[in-house]
Amino acid sequence: MPDDVTRQDGAASDATPRWRDPEIVVMDRLSPLTASLTWRDSTSGCYYDQIWRIGIARKHGVCPLTGRPVHLGDAVFRPIHSMVRPSNADAMIHADAIDALKPCER
């Protein structure tokens, strides 16, 4: 979805990504429900071995890995956060896109 998507009231859509062309690498599949990813982009920074967990999309969005729309109820991976919310916390990657990637070799 393009970055200039707006609602009827002129505000930016919730589906508008807050990052630009992230580089995403699956480092390891830790379990069927979790994966370790490296995320780098010019607007939200760099996260090495960030843990992502599978869940259900609670809002519409765009998968930064494939560019495909994310719809409510889709199976997606999202970054886990506890005390500090990462700048890519709203990112959702389609679960099938993660499953299709092979973890990188270290």
Image (cartoon, rainbow, N blue to C red):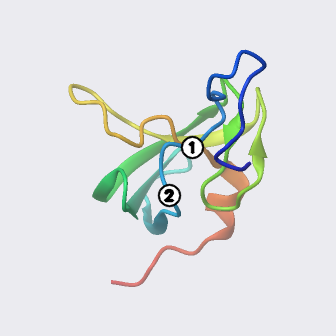
Q: Front-most of 95 and 71? A: 71
In percent of width and height, residue 38 lies at 37, 63
Query: Dot 1 corresponds to which residue?
Result: 17
Where on the picture, by quarter, is residue 101? bottom right
- In this view, the residue farthest toward the left is 83
Residue occupying image coordinates x 32% and y 32%: 81
Residue 71 visible at all: yes
- In this view, the residue farthest toward the front is 10
Type of amino acid at the residue the image marks with label 1: Pro
Residue 30 visible at all: no
Where on the picture, by quarter, is residue 62? top right
* Label pair 1/2, CB-CB below 8 angstroms: yes
**Secondary-structure class at tag 2:** loop
Where on the picture, by quarter, is residue 41? bottom left
Q: Is residue 96 above or below residue 10?
A: below
Type of amino acid at the residue the image marks with label 2: Arg
Query: Dot 2 corresponds to which residue?
Result: 20
In percent of width and height, residue 42 lies at 36, 61
Q: Please give left or right for residue 8 compared with residue 65 in the image.
A: right
Q: Please give left or right for residue 64 compared with residue 106 in the image.
A: right
In percent of width and height, residue 1 lies at 74, 48
**Secondary-structure class at tag 1:** loop
Q: Please give left or right for residue 18 compared with residue 65 in the image.
A: left
